[in-house]
Image: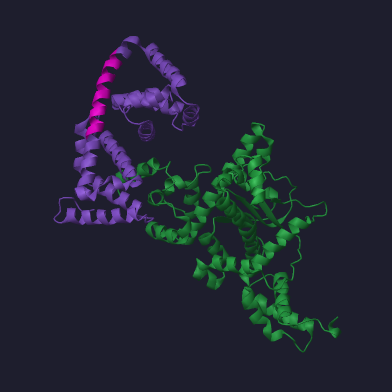
């Protein structure tokens, strides 16, 4: 391509900056979405222009659109999806962060707090108890099924990171030694002020969600099974505690869109109507708080547990687990031996962390009638 | 790319354009980019268009006409991508539509430019007589007008203008001012005077008759082109 053509295509892309129909206008200006894509995909300027002139992927067919665009620019579809997710999530967080700064400056404390516009949830580094809960809710099974349905190739290998990039408006970033402070520093590099109201502590995962988009941070130093499970856990938070309630609000009370994005407070009438219609306008809770011993409130623990249950369903579907552990139900060597053998099988098959595999195997065995006998106690 | 006058080339080009047009209407994700690349490469390969641009207006040299054509093609393609339905297939081929539209844009730009440069020649005589005092007055008047006519939003947007000249760029612009067209000199004078009002630039560029959004785009393109040109001259 001649210099003239490249320059002219650059000008065309520049003229489309204000039009979100095209990637040129869809990518955020703050932080610079073009730069994020350029770095994420190592694109030279001519290929970047080819990309910027494409239509922005439609949410309903994001993955197929991204694959077509990746083919056209000669890039990897997964890298493109990941970079697009990252750019858009950072743009949304930037907007919310700056809206909060503005609100604080204009002395609108209710909006400065903006707890309803932002979900922040963390998976602590300290060990947690994974509940042994048989018969997962049908809703989780349906949601997990939907999650994988867009990406059959990722489903086969249970490649959750690829599936997230393809099917959810969620970006995933690995940081070494993850903690609140390291996330704040990383976001500050993009001009985003993120100072959570909680002391720094080591984390396995952290989710920030706002304006319909999310960003997950994972401790990159974790072993692979822990990384996968932590990502699945944060996906659980994103779907169960953010996206689903948000969609419900937008469906039933669309006029509340600026309220749930933290741009204004709900009026009294809106609060009353939401209450009557059981629409949870205050659902975007801050899930970071812990007491002085590192414990979470009952409500937060319940929410964390649901996210873990959903994560298990995502990575080790209930039907497959119960079928797999059947052979160890009533193991003649005793209850514990059966649990150990079934756990190993679940761990090998689904590549889960040991504590998660144990909880899942126990639940499966319980469902199959394998109980602790009198002499097992 | 094959030349437009090769046998069968125009028919082949028309087929490609029509196929992309249909895909654009279907909101195919890459059709817009493919269309832009096809049109830009096609018109970039037609040296005659640069010559046509050069003769249509008061352009200083070939490079300037080449830059102007690049701006015009860029704006035209962007406009078409935004709304491909401006083309009505029942009224003829898409290739012919693009040819006709671009030639019209080139002609209009040339006319506007000639008008501006004529006005500028008059004003340059005045400037020579009044010296720097006159430039300062113009800048102050522009600033005054801006305060009176701009909305808060426009002021904020213009306040974010990344096109301010650095001291080094000002010096380069002054050193090479003889190589610049009167229009470019006028735009640079406004940039050098930290004038941010779109209206002032639109006057200088001869696009004040266009809607404000189009003026903004034209002004941005002109400033961008000049900044790049200065960078090349350094």
Colour chain B appears in: purple
Residue A295 image point, x, y percent: 80, 56
Please give the name of the residue rendered at 62% of the width and 77% of the height, measured from the top-left corner. A319
Please give the name of the residue rendered at 33% of the width and 53% of the height, measured from the top-left corner. B25
Colour chain A appears in: green
A159 lies above or below B47: below
Which color scheme does this rendered protein use? by chain
Q: Quadrant of residue B27?
A: bottom left
Please give the name of the residue rendered at 38% of the width and 25% of the height, measured from the top-left corner. B199
Q: Is residue A273 magenta?
A: no
Magenta residues, dominant SS class? helix
Q: Classify the position of the C terminus of chain A by image quarter.
A: bottom right
A282 lies above or below A230: above
Q: Is residue B68 visible?
A: yes
In the image, farthest residue toward the top = B129
Residue B184 image point, x, y percent: 32, 27
Q: In the image, A134: left or right of A243?
A: right
- Viewer-proximal residue, A71 or B157? B157
Q: Quadrant of residue A318?
A: bottom right
Q: In the image, A35: left or right of A356?
A: left
- Viewer-proximal residue, B76 or B60? B76
Q: Is residue A281 visible?
A: no
Q: What stretch of residues is rendered in magenta? A: B107-125
In the image, farthest residue toward the bottom = A332
A374 lies above or below B108: below
Q: Is residue B108 magenta?
A: yes
């Amino acid at each position: 391509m001649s210099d003239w053509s490249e320059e002219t295509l650059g000008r065309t892309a520049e003229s489309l900056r204000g039009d979100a129909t095209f990637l040129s206008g869809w990518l955020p200006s703050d932080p610079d979405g073009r730069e994020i894509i350029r770095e994420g995909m190592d694109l030279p300027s001519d290929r970047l222009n080819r990309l910027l002139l494409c239509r922005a992927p439609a949410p309903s067919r994001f993955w197929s659109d991204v694959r077509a665009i990746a083919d056209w620019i000669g890039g990897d579809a997964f890298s493109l999806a990941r970079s697009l997710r990252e750019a858009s999530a950072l743009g949304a967080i930037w907007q919310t962060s700056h809206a909060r700064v503005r609100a604080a400056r204009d002395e609108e404390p209710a909006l400065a707090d903006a707890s309803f516009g932002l979900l922040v949830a963390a998976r602590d580094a300290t060990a947690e108890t994974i509940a042994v809960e048989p018969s997962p809710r049908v809703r989780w099974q349906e949601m997990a099924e939907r999650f994988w349905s867009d990406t059959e190739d990722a489903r086969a290998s249970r490649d959750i990171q690829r599936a997230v990039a393809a099917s959810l408006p969620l970006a995933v970033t690995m940081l070494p030694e993850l903690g609140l402070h390291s996330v704040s520093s990383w976001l500050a590099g993009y001009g985003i002020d993120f100072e959570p109201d909680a002391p720094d502590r080591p984390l396995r995962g952290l989710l920030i969600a706002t304006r319909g988009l999310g960003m997950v941070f994972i401790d990159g130093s974790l072993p692979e099974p822990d990384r996968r499970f932590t990502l699945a856990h944060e996906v659980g938070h994103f779907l169960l505690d953010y996206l689903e309630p948000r969609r419900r609000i937008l469906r039933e009370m669309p006029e509340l869109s600026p309220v749930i994005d933290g741009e204004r407070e709900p009026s009294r009438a809106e609060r009353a109507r939401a209450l009557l219609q059981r629409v949870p306008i205050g659902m975007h809770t801050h899930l970071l708080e812990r007491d002085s011993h590192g414990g979470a409130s009952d409500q937060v623990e319940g929410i964390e547990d649901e996210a873990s249950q959903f994560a298990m369903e995502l990575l080790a579907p209930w039907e497959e687990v119960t079928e797999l552990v059947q052979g160890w139900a009533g193991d003649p060597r005793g209850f514990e031996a059966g649990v150990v053998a079934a756990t190993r099988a679940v761990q090998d098959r689904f590549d889960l962390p040991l504590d998660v595999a144990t909880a899942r195997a126990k639940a499966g065995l319980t469902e199959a009638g394998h109980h602790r006998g009198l002499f097992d106690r | 790319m094959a030349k437009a006058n090769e046998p069968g080339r125009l028919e082949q080009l028309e087929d490609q354009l029509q196929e992309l047009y249909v895909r654009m209407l279907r909101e195919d994700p890459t059709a817009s980019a493919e269309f832009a690349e096809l049109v830009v490469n096609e018109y970039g390969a037609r040296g005659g268009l640069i010559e046509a641009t050069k003769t249509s207006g008061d352009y200083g040299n070939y490079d300037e006409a080449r830059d102007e054509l690049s701006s015009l093609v860029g704006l035209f393609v962007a406009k078409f991508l935004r709304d491909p339905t401006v083309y009505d297939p029942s009224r003829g081929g898409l290739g012919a539509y693009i040819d006709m539209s671009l030639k019209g844009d080139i002609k209009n730009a040339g006319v506007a430019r000639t008008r501006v440069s004529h006005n500028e020649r008059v004003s340059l005589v005045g400037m020579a007589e009044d010296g720097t005092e006159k430039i300062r007055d113009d800048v102050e008047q522009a600033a005054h007008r801006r305060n009176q006519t701009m909305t808060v939003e426009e002021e904020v947007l213009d306040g974010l203008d990344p096109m301010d000249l650095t001291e080094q760029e000002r010096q380069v612009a002054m050193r090479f001012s003889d190589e610049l067209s009167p229009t470019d000199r006028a735009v640079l004078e406004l940039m050098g005077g930290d004038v941010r009002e779109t209206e002032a630039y639109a006057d200088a560029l001869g696009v004040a008759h266009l809607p404000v959004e189009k003026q903004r785009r034209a002004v941005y393109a002109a400033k961008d082109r000049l900044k790049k040109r200065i960078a090349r001259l350094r």
